[in-house]
Image: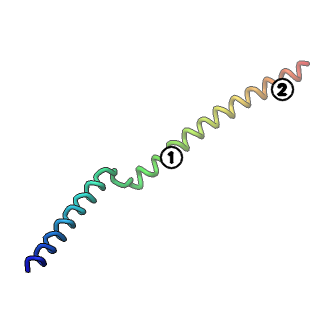
Amino acid sequence: MNTKLLLFVATVAISVISSTVALAGEAAYPSPLTCAQAHSELIQPAAAHESQRSDEAAAVAQRTKADTAARSDS
């Protein structure tokens, strides 16, 4: 009888310890993103890239106008 009781107590102790370790591991990770957070994280880099592309396009356009003016003056 004591052997069965000891086995039961050991099983319960192991399950409690493993549950505690699992919960501690989950606490280390942040909660999942909401749909709005995921959307904003995707939109911000896209908007920054678009403004960068438009700045580059404006620089190319200015350079092309200057090249065209220099060629027509020659």
Query: Residue 44: x percent and y percent?
Result: 50, 42
Q: Residue at x 16, y 74 (%)?
A: 7
- Compare residues 11 and 47 and report the one nearer the observer: 11
Regarding mark 2 in the picture, which secondary structure is present there? helix
Position of residue 50 relative to residue 20, above or below, is: above
The image shows residue 56, relative to residue 15, as above or below, that is above
Q: Residue at the spot x=69%, y=28% of the render?
A: 59
Q: At 12% from the left edge and 73% from the top edge, which residue is drawn? A: 6
* Helix, strand or loop at mark 1: helix
Q: Is residue 55 left or right of residue 9?
A: right
Q: Using the image, tell me which numbered label, if any, was put on residue 54.
A: none
Question: Which numbered disc, 1 or 2, marks the residue that appears first in the sequence?
Answer: 1
Residue 22 in the image: state x and y as whole percent: 28, 59
Identify the residue at image location x=55%, y=38%.
48
Q: Which of the two residues, 65 or 46, is positioned nearer the viewer here?
A: 46
Q: Position of residue 46 (x, y in %)?
A: 55, 44
Residue under numbered circle 1: 43
Residue bearing the label numbered 2: 68
When asked about the image quadrant of residue 21, the answer is bottom left
The crowding category of the residue bearing disc 1, from other C-alpha atoms within 10 Å (few below 14, some 14 to 19, many at least 20), is few
